[in-house]
Amino acid sequence: MSLHPRERYEVVIGLEVHTHLRTQSKLFSPAPVRYGDEPNHDVHPIDLALPGVLPVLNVAVIELAIRLGLAINGTVNRRSVFARKNYFYPDLPKGYQISQYEEPTVSGGWLEIEVPVAGGKAASSGKAASSATRGEFEIKRIGITRAHLEEDAGKSIHDPALAGSDDTLVDLNRAGVPLLEIVSEPDLRSSGDAVTYLKKLRSILRYVGVSDADMEKGQFRCDANVSLRPVGREAFGTRTEIKNINSFAMVEGAIEAEITRQAEILDDGGEVVQATMGYDPVKRRTRVLRLKENADDYRYFDDPDLIPLLIESEQVERVRAALPELPDAKRARFEDDYALSRHDAEILTSSRPLAAFFEEAAKIHGGGKKIANWVLRDLLALLKEREVEVDALALEPGALAALVKLVDSGRLTAKSAREIFPELADGGGDPEAIMQARGLEAVQDTGLIEGAVDEVIAANPKSVASFREGDKKVLNFMMGQVMKRTQGKANAAEVKRLLEAKLAG
Ligand code: ADP
Ligand code: MG
């Protein structure tokens, strides 16, 4: 067969996301939840299930679970039950993890992602996800099966520098940290879909204050379930589950590597075996860690030390009333209030601090579209380069508004404004004062601009001749020459007007 595997097989992905809840203490013990402490300093006997201890539910997690449930359009169940999931591992000295199994706190939700429209048939034949197309982006609704509360396990450290080459160290600071496991339906169709879904989910979690979801601190990790099916076939293929993915680059790399591995097996006429996989980012390969254990292997049973969690509808309504505006609602409002495209509004609302910054600057300036252009181009590039959120910069929304106003009025060229911008980002301050201090005020003097235009025309007879013979492209070159002579401070529209007038004459 000559088609690329991506054209012969459709990729099916479902994600299980583990996100640490923003709490002071653990799910069932008073030990603190802190990051970066000395190993094994934040541990309480309850976290180890020492004889005689009893777990006590941290009530702060209830509100966080409700917030998440509402934010993903899910059902917050009136009754949920904590169960014991039994397994042995060195980082789980209890011998079981307290989780929810048959009765989770949240069930049945969804969120929408905006992804580029894929060219091939493979990408559009998924029937599980409902899609609506707009422009070059497609909106996909991704189902969320459930979100359940559970405690995290400790951490095994295999680093030879710390542990010696054969040994493993165990840090139990993380044991008992509250988390929500959010399980998606198998509605994702590419590694790109998976990354976009994770970013959207992380954004929602941060908006509603459920989790800081910092991947570097291990607060937001996922397991990716991947299967392939021949294009056109309805039944899903056998899936494998890639464990413990903790960066966006790794999500993409791990899923792509697993697609390649499965496609090779299927191409050879073989069968994919259900298994738990690990990903090696250096070798860019997935490998089988263990053959898949089934739920039966965990011998789940209701935890006899804990009563069912009951959540009254009054509490759900109180939490609903206090929820901030969610990303999708904000996006729709930005489209209307500031006449933005859906795509631009989606990016502007991808983080709460960014959305707040944009909105304040737009209000002060009075023109949302112009502010949006600056935020989407210059500000985002800067944030990406420095890997920070906008509130880490000295830049004030009012300063951006003032900068754009200076450009509007012709007192500052866009080029000079772009020179001032990084200075505002680092040191704050008033754009007008910086413009004056650096002598960047645009040349308003028509006489001065005219002089420069005349010089350029006199110095470039060949260009003038080409222009008059119909080669309009030389105009850009000549404008550049005038700009050079005025140190980029001449108003571009004025230069163009004068040049055209003189060349025509
Ligand atoms: P387990 O406990 O075995 O991990 P879960 O029900 O917690 O099972 O999670 C199953 C995950 O696998 C879900 O995200 C689901 O969408 C996904 N999934 C189920 N079937 C497939 C499949 N054939 N291909 C890809 N993903 C799948
Ligand atoms: Mg699971």
Image (spheres, rainbow, N blue to C red):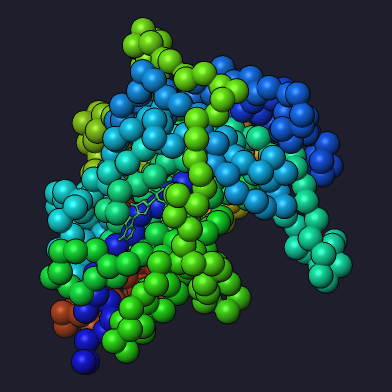
Viewer-side residue, 340 vs 50: 50
Inspect this view and state whether residue 129 appears.
Answer: yes
Left or right, 472 with reference to 264 = left
Residue at position x 52%, y 47% in the image: 298
Q: Which of the 4 image quarters holds residue 499?
A: bottom left
Viewer-side residue, 294 vs 176: 294
Q: From the image, which quarter does the N terminus lie in?
A: bottom left
Viewer-side residue, 42 vs 333: 42
**Residue 110, position as x, y percentages in the image:** 28, 39
In the picture shown, does residue 252 fall above or below 58? below
In the picture shown, does residue 466 fall above or below 201? below
In the rendered image, the residue lying farthest to the bottom is 2
Q: From the image, which quarter does the C terminus lie in?
A: bottom left
**Residue 194, position as x, y percentages in the image:** 37, 56
Residue at position x 27%, y 44% in the image: 143
**Residue 323, position as x, y percentages in the image:** 40, 19
Residue at position x 41%, y 79% in the image: 261
Q: Which of the 4 image quarters holds residue 468?
A: bottom left
Residue at position x 27%, y 46% in the image: 142
